[in-house]
Image (tube, helix red, strand yellow):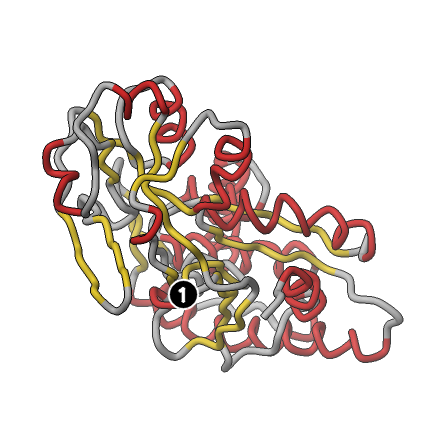
Amino acid sequence: MPVLPTSRLSRADLADLNSFLAVERLRSFTQAAVELGITTSALSHSVRNLEARLGVRLLNRTSRTVSPTDAGAVLAKRLTVGFTEISAALAALDNHRDRPSGRLRLNVLCDGARLLLSEYLPRFLEAYPDVSVEVAVDDKMVDIVSAGFDAGVRFGDTIPEDFIAVRISDPLRWVAVASPKYLNTRPRIEVPEDLKDQNCIQIRTGNGVIYRWDFEKDGDHRTIDVPGQLCSNETTFGVEMALAHCGITYCLEARVRSYLDRGELQVVLPDWAPIEPAFHIYYPGRRQMPPGLRELIDTLRLGITS
């Protein structure tokens, strides 16, 4: 097999090798093109050029799937080690800079994006203009390493093992809320079990299941499988439907604070509102921390009061 001598590797060679590695890792030209910020056709051309120069096929392609050949799998394994070392070397240069520079890719659940990033990310971007940030807002749990993210934001009790997790918020209060108009036309709700006779806006979680609502009072914890005519996988839409008098929704109190203050929504069972784990940012501990991540964590932690 022809070899690209390391002493004569050009910028194009390195770019093509990186392109191949992204496609092999994501098993998708489309997803790899998005990650690399290029068109799918340009990415395909890059990989074809690499295969032509090496004289060996690296990827098996069909109309629906992409998978490495035996040669491609061997090359990808060794390239991963090499590019990891390159990334670590570049990150180490931050010790010699006055401020970090580079690119951060974050995977953040919707509540975290709305309540934390929307408030604190602007001041981070202003303070560190040499760091660019890409945010993927997604309630589905993804493998941030294989998907090419530097860090993720999730609730503290949902973070996979083997990651470093840092708390970036106070503990979170969850509430059931509805409009006064809805509540005035329905039977009184005094205990969580009364919700079984109500029209609740069900929640489909990021892993595809219907969420069972949690309530807690003086150590008495109850989980209710609520009924409802409507189901949504997005908090904002559920809140909008509650404002439209369609039923009771369940969410973080902070997401509806302004509506509660204006009386447009009311907390149902306020004495039963549970306090759950805070938002955490997490990242793989076996890697060199990318430039800017430590500064971002410090910025996000500004809102912690306890």
Name the residue located 32 percent from the left edge and 41 percent from the top edge: 176
Judging depth in this view, the residue of 278 and 205 nearest the camera is 278
Crowd rating for badge 1 (residues with CA inside 10 Å; few <14, some 14–19, many 20+)? some
Q: Report helix, strand or loop for mark 1.
A: loop
Q: Quadrant of the C terminus?
A: bottom right
Position in image of residue 116 (x %, y %): 58, 51
Query: Is 215 on the left or on the right of 260, as rendered?
Result: left
**Looking at this view, is 166 or 136 the one in front?**
166
| 277 displayed left or right of 79 | left
For the view shown, which residue lies furthest in the right direction? 98
Q: Amino acid at mark 1?
A: Pro
Q: What x and y, as percent, mark residue 91?
A: 70, 73
Q: Quadrant location of residue 246?
A: top left
Quadrant in which the N terminus is drawn: bottom left
Residue 237 sits above or below residue 295 on the image: above
Residue, x 50% and y 82% (percent of image)?
Answer: 286
Residue 299 lies, with reference to residue 85, above or below; the image says above
Q: Is residue 260 above or below residue 46?
A: above
Locate residue 125 relative to residue 44 in the image: left or right: right
**Residue 15 in the image: x percent, y percent?**
61, 55
| 229 over 107 or under it: above or below | above
Badge 1 is on which residue? 277
Query: In the rendering, at what x and y percent does residue 117 appear?
Result: 61, 49
Please count the marks in the image: 1
Residue drawn at x 47%, y 63% is 171
